């Protein structure tokens, strides 16, 4: 099978205007992925499916990843040589930078015809609040139907062109997207017999006075 | 839900839904099958629209058993997610364990000792036997046999569960695999017991097939029902016995060759029609192949350690990276997608549930068939709600 | 004996009237079945065992099922009441049909020797009945048979004609 | 021929019907409350705390309230409060002990991870399975008195594992004693040193501050 | 219970009559007739009520043993008190009527069903002297009463105001219409051969033995065997038993027409199903298996009603055995089986029976020819139609990757 950068090069030559970049995976698995931009995603996906050299006809896995806004602290060291000829003076300068978050959808593609894979595709939304639309790849691989619904349900990515984009695991009236990192679970505490940690905090909030009867340590005869 | 928008993807016959009211035919009947229906295998629900008894529209409804497994996985340590994988497909906890352990091992670049690999193959094939046996029983139960095939299936299943119990301490929630090996070694006599079970399983299958495979009623109920084309199967991401019943030779044990599967001699049975009968028979034949693998594995299993000595139980923090790893579970391709940021918990923990994705084609298979067939088709897809809803 | 007859007659006529007057179509059908049973009871009272049981078997056992099927398959909504009074032409044809049936019945009654003494009913065995049907009345039996066959084929053609154009069941 | 498959099936059921009267392989039912199947040694259900001495279970718990199990427990069913003081353990060493050690068996999924992560072999898996209680909250919440079981009980349940654990503990203790003896000898050699402080509790993770009881 | 006992019969044979006379003998004539009739009703209800109770137990035990488990064994010795425990449970359960249900029909359905199935017991000859009602056209009466039972099932399904129940009602109707015909056609040859519609007459016609060995039961003729098979298959369907239990198909329609029934009404349905099964088996015994006749002359010392009971129980065992084994048919396959297989077979069988009775004078080598022709007439259509029915179905071979 072609390596991901070969595929990227081929894609760039086939789709001149498209932005395809390689995202390398530092782990031992070394499953590098291709980041596509939303505009060309479906055309590229169709190409990958139908290209005789790749024939990625099987979309195994579709999933979302939430990357919240992240404050990145960069430390830059500037060393100014001491004119007196002593050791260089090192000045550490910390700059804070806000890396904007996004929602990412990852597709793992394999080829049943040629028995190779995986080719990993990534799509990223503009941000996590209002630009959350991505093209649906369900018309290319039917396997995405339920999985994209799940990503929509749990992450809040809106797939344009999906035939039946409804919530799948949560109920229809549910508001939030539980798999987002900043999801706050609803305050629906029921008293549990092991109040400690978070549960204890909730227990105190819900049962201010008197607190629920915790099993007291009674020395047994 | 309106009736005028059938899923544009459904290419099955009968996909066009006529108007609800029709002067000559009377009403379409909308039946909500589930979540408390006896044959939806748990809390699955199908919104079925019937024309007489013919299914003209079928929408699966999920989520009654949803507990956000993936969120739990992201808030639990790598090790702590292992017992939760038991509860995905609670018939196949051993393969779930293996799939997860394999993913983490790939993420952290760990090796597994030889004996542990053999044990994993043995346990995975026993799980396959267990799952397919149960499926055959449930399928026949859905066909209306009054419990007899199911009880026979469960009788044999108990024997496998006994093996699991004496090895891992629990019948269904095994929690047995660890990153870099297995938790405990097989106790004395366990391998002999497994050999005895394997050798006796063939005769059970013979009897089971005598009971049902040649049965005219079963054939009438399953042959030609719910045909799945190879093209749709691949496109819809259908995996496992369903895919092979549709005639696609795609078995991850052969394709990926994970574990020690390349060392074993076994064949992959393929169906020609993709109907319910093929799905049933492919599983029966797979069981016979599993017996062959088990016999080889139990013959060849070496002595030695079962745990990578470098493996860490506490304070396990893989380096940043990402992995998608999959194995051939009894129900299809079960995969885990993990992203590590270097912390004790995975940053992203995703399960690729074969049961859920195999349900994509449920409507296509059921359209145009009667409601009785829909139940049997659902049974032949083989779902476990713990995995569908997660 | 007459008390029994009056009772049977009351039940039969009463259920028939109720079946006609009822607004619930399903109840009407079931009442109709009861009326047929009443007729059978009358046959039984008259000593015609065979006719009575055949009446139940055919009417209660089969015809009522067919009527139920028709009712269930053609109604639009299960809670909808029976159709209201129809137009003029429909009423006219109904009256004409009723008049024709009544004419035949009255003619038959008038011609039968009702005045004869109500002596003991002749003991008719099944064998005799069969012989009669296959002998003097064979032509009538055949005619009825042909009529029913034609009706059956007509029904099949009607039902099958609707099927054309629809996809056949998947093999 | 039509019906041959049906007859074959009928023959199988007849065989099973007859077989259920004489063949124990076919008739596998156990009449549960009267008969019980023998549990395999590996069988696990709910954890218990190992104490060295059956007479004084609270005084001889192996647990030192290090709270690793509480942290690692996937469903978070363990609740530990460290003691403020120290008490001598079975070997007479001064140790912190769990003032509160609760396990909510309604939440516990018997996954055995607490056992695996415990560095002191203080928590082991029990084999109880008849824990039905009429009250969900109190009946299934086991405190340390209910959880403490003597080491002999552990031997009874898991003889192989218990023997291993005892061996390991004995060697560790011996090694510690030898080390202590060597240290004492060294101390004697350097007699001018001040008296040794008691060794710190062998906690391996930084301990979180104790949580006050909810009541 | 009419026929006078001859003195040559054993005491046991006459025991029921003697018992009856002991109870009602002192009464004057019209009252005695009434008392005798009431006594028959009570006797039939008591015997079949108990049979129902223990049949449910037997079914569960046998089903259990077939499935390699003991079945109910906790209530009483070997679980013998289980039916009574079940009965008490059923009686004390709440009777739930859905608010949207048709209250009247919902109540009437189980009552009608049970009444109709009890009516069918009236004409079965249970022994030499044990016929509750002698009717000239008893067989017709039997099927007339039986035919109306599905009407009650329909009432139950429709009145429940439940979609599953409604589907079950439709299925019940289709099933009845389909299987009424083969059921009726399968016994016509018996009537043809015996020349009577009276059950006692039919049993009497099957008396005697050929060479003191082979009884003259109708099932021992080629057409009789075929008719018996058709009758039993249709009887399975008529009594809604597996593999034809479509109206209450658990895996599809929850419990079909019984979905909205609970408590005692449910028990009534249950009872009616078993009564129907017993009645149809009893009729099968009467029509084809020689009724109360003993199979061998030397066995005649055993009272006739014991023989009847033995044959009845054997057939019921067959019902249970089939239930333990077979999966369910689909509704279209069910009707296809009736119209394309059983009805033609029954019609051909009528011809075979006619041939058989026309050639009754044949003897010697002609007798062999008679058997050969009849067997061909029975087996030929069976094989041909069976092939048509299973066209396209069959075991398959599989390839390996």
Image (cartoon, coloured by chain):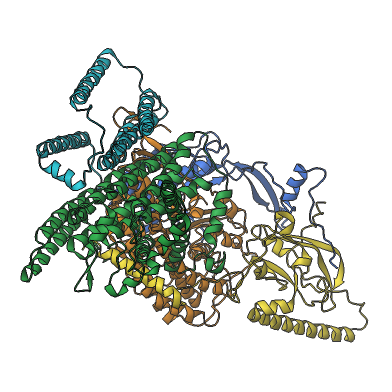
Please report the residue visible at 59 percent of the width from the left and 53 percent of the height from the top: B72
Look at the image and give the colour of chain A. Answer: blue
Palette colour of chain C: cyan
Image position, residue B128 (x, y; %): 42, 66
Q: Colour of chain B?
A: orange
Q: Quadrant of residue E110?
A: top left
Q: Is residue D103 left or right of residue B301?
A: right
Q: Position of residue E369 (x, y in %)?
A: 7, 67
Q: Quadrant of residue E274?
A: bottom left
User: C35 left or right of B390?
Assistant: left
Looking at the image, is B207 positioned above or below residue B215?
below
Looking at the image, the residue that sits furthest to the top is C88
Apparent side of residue D131 relative to residue C117 in the rendered image (left or right): right
Residue B18 placement: quadrant: top left
> Which residue occupies the foreground of this view, A161 or B276?
B276
Q: Is residue D36 visible?
A: yes
In the image, which lettered chain appears green? E
Q: How many marks?
A: 0
Q: Chain D is which colour? A: yellow
Q: Position of residue C14 (x, y in %)?
A: 38, 27
Residue B364 visible in the snapshot = no
Decide: is E355 above or below B364: below
Q: Which of these two is toward me, E377 or B188?
A: E377
Is residue B5 positioned above or below E9 on the image? Answer: above
């Amino acid at each position: 099978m072609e390596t991901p950068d070969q595929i990227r090069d081929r894609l760039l030559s086939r789709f001149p205007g498209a932005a395809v970049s390689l995202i390398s995976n530092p782990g031992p698995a070394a499953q590098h992925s291709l980041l596509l931009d939303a505009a060309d995603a479906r055309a590229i996906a169709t190409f990958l499916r139908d290209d005789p050299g790749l024939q990625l006809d099987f979309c195994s896995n579709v999933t979302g990843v939430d990357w919240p806004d992240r404050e990145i602290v960069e430390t830059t060291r500037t060393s100014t040589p001491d004119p007196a000829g002593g050791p260089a003076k090192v000045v550490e300068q910390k700059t804070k930078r806000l890396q904007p978050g996004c929602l990412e959808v990852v597709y793992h593609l394999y080829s049943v015809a040629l028995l190779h894979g995986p080719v990993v595709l990534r799509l990223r939304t503009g941000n996590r609040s209002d630009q959350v639309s991505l093209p649906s790849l369900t018309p290319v691989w039917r396997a995405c139907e339920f999985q994209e619904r799940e990503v929509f349900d749990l992450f809040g990515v809106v797939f344009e062109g999906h035939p039946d984009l409804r919530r799948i695991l949560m109920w229809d009236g549910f508001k939030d997207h539980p798999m987002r990192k900043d999801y706050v679970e609803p305050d629906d505490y029921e008293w549990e017999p092991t109040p400690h940690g978070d549960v204890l905090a909730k227990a105190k909030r819900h049962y201010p006075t008197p607190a629920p009867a915790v099993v007291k340590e009674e020395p047994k005869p | 839900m309106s009736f005028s928008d059938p899923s544009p993807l459904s290419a099955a016959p009968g996909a066009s839904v006529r108007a609800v009211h029709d002067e000559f035919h009377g009403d379409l009947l909308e039946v909500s099958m589930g979540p408390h229906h006896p044959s939806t295998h748990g809390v699955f629900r199908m919104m079925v629209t019937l024309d007489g008894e013919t299914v003209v529209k079928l929408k699966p409804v999920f989520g009654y058993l949803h507990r956000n497994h993936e969120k739990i996985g992201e808030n639990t340590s790598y090790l702590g997610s292992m017992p939760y994988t038991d509860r995905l497909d609670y018939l196949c906890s051993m393969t779930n364990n293996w799939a997860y352990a394999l993913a983490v091992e790939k993420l952290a670049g760990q090796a597994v000792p030889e004996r542990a690999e053999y044990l994993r193959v043995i346990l995975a094939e026993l799980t396959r036997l267990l799952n397919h046996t149960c499926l055959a029983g449930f399928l026949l139960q859905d066909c209306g046999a009054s419990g007899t095939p199911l009880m026979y299936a469960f009788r044999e299943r108990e024997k496998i569960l006994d093996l699991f119990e004496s090895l891992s301490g629990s019948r269904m929630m095994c929690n047995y695999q660890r990153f870099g090996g297995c938790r405990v070694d097989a106790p004395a006599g366990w391998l002999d017991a497994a050999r005895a079970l394997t050798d006796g399983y063939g005769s059970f299958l013979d009897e089971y097939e005598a009971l049902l495979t040649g049965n005219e009623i079963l054939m009438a109920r399953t042959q030609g029902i719910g045909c799945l084309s190879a093209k749709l199967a691949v496109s819809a991401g259908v995996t496992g016995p369903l895919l092979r019943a549709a005639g696609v030779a795609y078995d991850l044990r052969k394709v990926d060759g994970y574990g020690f599967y390349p060392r074993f001699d076994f064949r992959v049975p393929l169906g020609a029609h993709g109907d319910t009968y093929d799905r049933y028979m492919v599983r029966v034949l797979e069981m016979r192949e599993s017996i062959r693998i088990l016999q080889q594995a139990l013959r060849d299993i070496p002595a030695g350690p079962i745990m990578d000595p470098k493996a860490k139980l506490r304070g396990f923090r893989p380096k940043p990276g990402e992995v998608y790893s999959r194995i051939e579970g009894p129900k299809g391709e079960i995969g885990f997608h993990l992203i590590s940021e270097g912390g004790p918990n995975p940053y992203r923990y995703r399960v690729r549930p074969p049961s859920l994705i195999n349900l994509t084609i449920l409507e296509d298979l059921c359209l145009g068939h009667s409601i009785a067939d829909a139940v049997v088709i659902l049974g032949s897809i083989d779902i476990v709600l713990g995995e569908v809803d997660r | 004996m007459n008390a029994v007859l009056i009772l049977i007659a009351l039940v039969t006529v009463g259920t028939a009237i109720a079946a006609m007057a009822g607004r619930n179509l399903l109840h009407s059908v079931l009442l109709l079945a009861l009326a047929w049973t009443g007729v059978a009871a009358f046959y039984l009272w008259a000593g015609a065992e065979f006719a009575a049981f055949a009446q139940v078997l055919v009417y209660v056992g089969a015809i009522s099922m067919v009527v139920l099927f028709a009712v269930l398959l053609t109604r639009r909504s299960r809670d909808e009441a029976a159709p209201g009074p129809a137009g003029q032409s429909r009423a006219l044809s109904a009256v004409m049909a009723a008049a024709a049936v009544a004419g035949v019945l009255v003619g038959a009654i008038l011609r039968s020797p009702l005045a004869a003494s109500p002596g003991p009913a002749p003991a008719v065995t099944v064998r005799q009945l069969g012989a009669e049907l296959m002998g003097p009345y064979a032509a009538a039996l055949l005619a009825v048979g042909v009529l029913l066959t034609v009706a059956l084929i007509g029904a099949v053609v009607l039902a099958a004609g609707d099927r054309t154009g629809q996809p056949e069941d998947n093999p | 021929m039509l019906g041959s498959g049906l007859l074959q099936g009928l023959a199988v059921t007849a065989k099973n019907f007859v077989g259920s009267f004489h063949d124990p392989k076919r008739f596998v039912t156990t009449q549960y409350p009267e008969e019980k199947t023998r549990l395999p040694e590996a069988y696990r259900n709910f954890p218990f705390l190992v104490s060295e001495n059956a007479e004084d279970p609270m005084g001889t718990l192996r647990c030192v309230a290090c709270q690793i199990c509480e942290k690692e427990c996937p469903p978070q069913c363990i609740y530990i409060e460290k003691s403020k003081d120290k008490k001598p353990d079975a070997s007479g060493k001064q140790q912190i002990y769990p003032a509160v050690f609760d396990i909510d068996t309604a939440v516990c999924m018997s996954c055995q991870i607490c056992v695996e992560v415990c560095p002191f072999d203080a928590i082991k898996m029990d084999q109880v399975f008849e824990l039905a209680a009429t009250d969900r909250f109190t009946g299934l919440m086991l405190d340390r008195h209910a959880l403490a079981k003597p080491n002999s009980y552990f031997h009874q349940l898991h003889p192989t594992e218990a023997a291993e654990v005892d061996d390991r503990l004995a060697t560790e203790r011996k090694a510690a004693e030898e080390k202590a003896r060597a240290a004492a000898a060294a101390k004697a050699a350097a007699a001018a040193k001040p008296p040794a402080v008691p060794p710190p509790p062998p906690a391996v993770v930084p301990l979180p501050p104790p949580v006050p009881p909810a009541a | 219970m009419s026929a006078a006992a001859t003195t040559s019969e054993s005491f046991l044979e006459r025991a029921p009559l003697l018992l009856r006379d002991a109870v009602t003998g002192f009464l004057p004539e019209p009252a005695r007739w009434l008392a005798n009739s009431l006594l028959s009703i009570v006797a039939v209800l008591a015997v079949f009520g108990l049979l129902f109770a223990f049949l449910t137990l037997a079914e569960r035990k046998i089903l259990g043993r077939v499935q390699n488990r003991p079945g109910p064994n906790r209530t009483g010795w070997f679980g013998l008190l289980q039916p009574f425990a079940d009965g008490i449970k059923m009686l004390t359960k709440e009777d739930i009527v859905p608010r949207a249900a048709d209250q009247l029909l919902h109540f009437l359905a189980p009552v009608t069903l049970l009444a109709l199935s009890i009516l069918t017991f009236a004409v079965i000859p249970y022994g030499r002297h044990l016929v509750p009602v002698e009717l000239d056209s008893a067989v017709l009466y039997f099927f007339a009463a039986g035919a109306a039972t599905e009407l009650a099932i329909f009432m139950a399904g429709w009145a429940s105001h439940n979609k599953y129940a409604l589907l079950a009602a439709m299925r019940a109707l289709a099933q009845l219409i389909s299987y009424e015909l083969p059921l009726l056609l399968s016994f016509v040859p018996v009537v043809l051969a015996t020349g009577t519609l009276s059950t006692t007459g039919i049993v009497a016609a099957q008396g005697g033995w050929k060479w003191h060995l082979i009884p003259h039961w109708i099932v021992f003729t080629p057409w009789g065997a075929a008719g018996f098979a058709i009758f039993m298959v249709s009887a399975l369907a008529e009594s809604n038993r597996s593999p034809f239990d479509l109206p209450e198909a658990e895996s599809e329609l929850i419990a079909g027409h019984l979905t909205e029934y609970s408590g005692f009404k449910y028990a009534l349905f249950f009872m009616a199903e078993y009564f129907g099964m017993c009645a149809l088996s009893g009729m099968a015994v009467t029509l084809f298996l020689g009724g109360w006749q003993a199979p061998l002359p030397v066995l005649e010392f055993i009272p006739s009603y014991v023989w009847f009971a033995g044959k009845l129980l054997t057939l019921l065992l067959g019902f249970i055995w089939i239930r333990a084994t077979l999966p369910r048919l689909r509704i279209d396959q069910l009707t296809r089986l009736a119209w394309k297989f059983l009805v033609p077979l029954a019609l051909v069988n009528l011809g075979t029976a006619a041939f058989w009775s026309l050639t009754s004078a044949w003897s010697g080598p002609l007798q062999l020819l008679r058997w050969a022709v009849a067997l061909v007439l029975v087996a030929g259509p069976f094989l041909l139609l069976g092939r048509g029915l299973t066209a396209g179905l069959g075991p398959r071979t599989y390839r390996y990757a």
